[in-house]
């Protein structure tokens, strides 16, 4: 997750955005980026998540691209 956050931050910086990686202990990082535009009257917000599945499907906990309802976290033995 940290590597993904850093890669996304680098892409934003290349495009001239001001970037901050927000971190709280025990939680994944969030990337905050802003393009200052003096005099702007509106704000546009984009959200994307970057915590993708492993590239090896054998490491997946379920079928790729198939929604699965779980009773909790896999790490806690959820069904």
Image: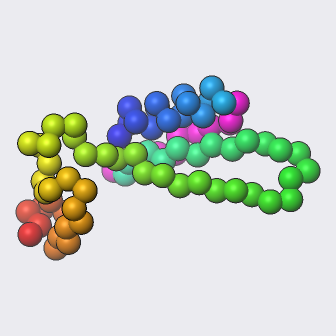
Position of 29 compared to 26: left or right? right
> What residue is shown at x 13% (from left), y 57% (from top)?
62
> What residue is shown at x 46% (from left), y 32% (from top)?
6
The magenta stretch spans which residues? 16-26
Q: How is the image coloured?
A: rainbow
Q: Is residue 28 magenta?
A: no
> What residue is shown at x 75% (from left), y 57% (from top)?
43
Where does the C terminus fall, quadrant-wise? bottom left
Could you say where residue 27 lies in the image, as x and y percent from the top left? 37, 51
Observer-nearest of 42 and 78: 42
Position of 34 compared to 26: left or right? right
Q: Quadrant of residue 75?
A: bottom left
Q: Is residue 20 magenta?
A: yes
Could you say where residue 4 lies in the image, as x and y percent from the top left? 40, 36
Total labels drawn: 0
Q: Is residue 24 visible?
A: no
């Amino acid at each position: 997750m940290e590597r993904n956050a850093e890669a996304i931050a680098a892409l934003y910086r290349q495009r001239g955005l001001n970037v901050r990686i927000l971190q709280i202990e025990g939680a994944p990082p969030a990337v905050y980026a802003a393009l200052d535009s003096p005099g702007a009257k509106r704000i546009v917000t984009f959200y994307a998540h970057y915590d993708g599945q492993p590239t090896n499907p054998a490491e997946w906990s379920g079928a790729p691209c198939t929604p699965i309802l779980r009773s909790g976290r896999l790490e806690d033995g959820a069904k």
